Every structure is written in C-alpha cells, then in structure tokens.
Image: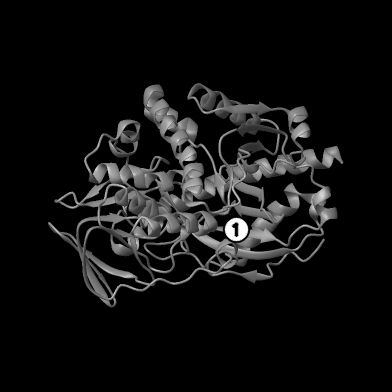
Amino acid sequence: MKNSTIRSFSSTSFWFDNLDPPPSSFPSLEGDHSYDVVVIGGGFTGLSTAIALRERNIRVAVVEKGLAGSGASGRNSGHVGCSLGMLPLLTYKNFGEERTQQLSRVVNKAVDNVAYMIEQGGVDCDYNQCGNIMAAVSRGEENSKIEKYAALFEKMGIENELLDERALQRKGIPECVVQAAHWKKGGVINPAKYARCLTKIALEKGVDLFENSEVESVVPGKKVLIKTGKGRVSCHHCVLATNAYSGELGFLKQKIIPMSVSVFVSDPLTPEQRSRLDWYGGEGITTAHMALENIRLTADNRVLIGSKSARLGFGNSQPRPNDSLTFSKLNTVFRDRLPELNDVNIDVGWTGRVAISSDGVPSIGTLSKHNNIYYGVGYSGHGIAMASNAGNVIAQLICQEDLEDAGILVDRKSLPVPPEPFRWLVGRSVMAAMRRIDKKTDRHAQLERQARM
C-alpha cells in the first residue's frame, strides 16, 4: 500500500487552487455606496441571486469575504443531484405526499438550472451528466433503505433505476457496491469552475462585485447598513447568502447547524490504474450510511473521497480543518471501498462547511421588522443545485412575484435549533448514534468482502 498520509492541505480546495487561469481579485469595498440590493456572500446563492435581480434591472452588489466561490461553494465534493432533503423518508413523513411532490418539482427544476447556467455562461465546468448512485456497501438493512428510497423518488417523479448486482456489473460500478439506486438526473461537476461560471454571468449582467471585504456588521432598518473594515453600503434590501457562515454575523442561529466536512483527492490515476476500474460512466457514488461517504472520479482521473465524518463546533467556532483523525477515516474509506487502487497516493485534502437545517430541507425567508433582510440557507449537503437555484426564489420574493412550487421552501414551519450549549450536546449525541450504526454497516461490509475473497 502506498503512503496513506495527505501530501498537502489546501486552505481553500483542490478545485479552487487549480483554476486556470487563477482567479483575479476584484476591488474591496471602500468608502460609502448605495444600492437597491446588497448580497453578502459570493457563493452559489449570492451569485445566483445577483444574476436573477439584474435580470429584473435591479442595481445589486455582491460583498464577499474572500474571493467569489472560495468558500463552501468551491469546496464541496461536486455532486449535482436530486435530493428530497437530507433524509428523504423523513421529509415525506413530515411533509406528506402533496408537499413532497411539490418539493420534488423544485428539486428537478434546480438540477435543470445547473445545465442552463453553464450553457448561459459558456464555461467548461467538467459537468458529467451521468447521474448519481445511492449505494449499499453491505446487504441487509442498507438494501431495504435503498429500495425504499428508490420507490419514494419514483413516486415523487424523480427518475431513478434500482440496480442489482448484475446491473452494477454492467455499469462497471466498483465491487464495494452491492445494490444501488441510480438517480438519472444530474451528475458530477467541478464546483469551483461552476462558481467561476456564475461569476462571469453576474459580471456580464452588470453586478458590482466587491471581494476581500469581510462584513463586520449588518444594521437593520428601513434601509439596511452594511459595514466592512474600509467601507459602508446602504440598501433597500439585503440578502444573507452566507449559509453556514451566517452565525458569525449574528444571524440564523436558530435555523441551521454549521458542520465541517472534509474531502481529499488522490494522485491522478495512471492508465494502468484506471484500467482496473470498469467505472466507465463515472457516476457519483453516495453511500447509504447515516454519515454518508462521497466517492467519485474527477475529470483528470483522480479519486475523490469526502464526507463520512462531519464535525460540529461550539458556537461560532469550527473544528480544526486539517484534523489528522478525520482524514485518516477518509483514507480508510478509500482503501476499503477501492482496494484495487491500494498503490495510489493521496494528494490534496481540504475542509469546507455545510449548514444543516432542523428538517434537512433548505429554508428561504426574511428577517427584521421591515422584512427587508432575506436569506437562503440549510442546503444540508446538497447545495450545488439547490443553492444556485435559490437566487431565483429570493429574487421572486424580493420582487413579490408568485413563488409557485418554490413556496415550499419559504412558507413552512420547522423546529428551531436549540441555543448553546444544548445545540452542541444534542448534535454530538446524534452524531455518536450515527457513528454506531455506521460502524455496524462497515463491519458487515468487511466480513462480506472477506467472504468473497
């Protein structure tokens, strides 16, 4: 087996570090400015909101802490998929059939929107529209979960196919997968290139982008005042497109739980190493664990391993991003799921944030007594499609347009997230229970693999 340690750790991500050409920095916010709408955050939600508002001829600026797309949007695993929330069966139980069908139409539209935005921007985002696979790595309870998921998604109008072992072999899916549901719509993408695509569209439409401008305070009022270290900007409407970072501004602590999730990529596979995998379609794989595993191939034939061990900080603090134990767990996933690549080194690791809502479904709404501070948060690990479509919904909300099916994201009640220290205590307890269930699954998978050898 090759070296299992990570060669380097990125403070942003492998995706962002390898953009070609490298991202150029736009001016920071200095002095006093005024706009109709100011969007805080230059990720998928912020950029898509700005684009949708400019299409309505509204003067809008985006204020970004770092570089556009360098936050959570440019750090994820790059799966574009149809998801009925973090726990689809629970979503169905909570929402009922009619409202879950409404959500499914929103989800389908959000995935279609990704391809539309790429076509509009004319940027190659390495988007492989191969779909994604929800995979069982051991027989038993996981298989039952896969079958229930497949039946629910089919009932809700999200196209998928249940794959038995023969079907998996025909597709060349790695042998670690014993049963799966193939979600046909969506696929895998380079998220940093997609963020660049949205940035290009925004600039072409006349959005003013201020980078390296960390917001220090947001002062509500009939006109919202936003302050950075060197400038101030007032606006009629403000959009918090800060998702898991929202708590740092003092907002949305009762709406979301911010989690840290880590990812790594291997060295590029040699032609001989790649030939050991029949995985010709390159479908994104997400396991049916409680704390899921992301497994996929990149456009340059690297293996990406992500998630598995989400970590919770206390208050606004976040766990150490380059935690060796977390990356050791990801390495175990790599070696257990793809033993045919045991001579492949790990190259780059990084960590990003996700925001989990209390019901696992994204939330869009308004804040302040003037109802002029808007937000889109809680994508719960499924942010590429949902976050980059959230801007359309937020723009409709600002302009008082008919939300149609997207009203399901706005007009609903959910349990509030408890304050600290209860959030931390409850979160840790839930994650410990999830780990116990997953360890049982992994033991079964290991025994089954040994029996096949």
- Residue 433 image position (x, y, % from top left): 53, 45
User: Dot 1, how many residues are within 10 Å of its Cα: few (below 14), some (14-19), or many (20+)?
Assistant: many
Residue 419 picture quarter:
bottom left
Q: Is residue 255 above or below residue 193?
A: above
Residue closest to the eye, 75 or 430:
75
Q: Position of residue 339 (x, y in %)?
A: 79, 50
Does 297 sit left or right of 420 as displayed? right
Q: What is the quadrant of residue 270 in the picture?
A: bottom right
Dot 1: element: strand
Residue 99, horizontal then vertical, whole percent: 37, 27
Quarter of the image that includes the C terminus: top right
For label 1, the residue is: 263
Residue at x 26%, y 51% (from the top left corner): 57
| Along the line of sight, the residue nearer the viewer: 66 or 382 | 66
Residue at the left extreme? Answer: 222
Q: Residue at x 66, y 59 (%)?
A: 265
Q: Residue at x 61, y 26 (%)?
A: 147
Quarter assignment of residue 159 = top right
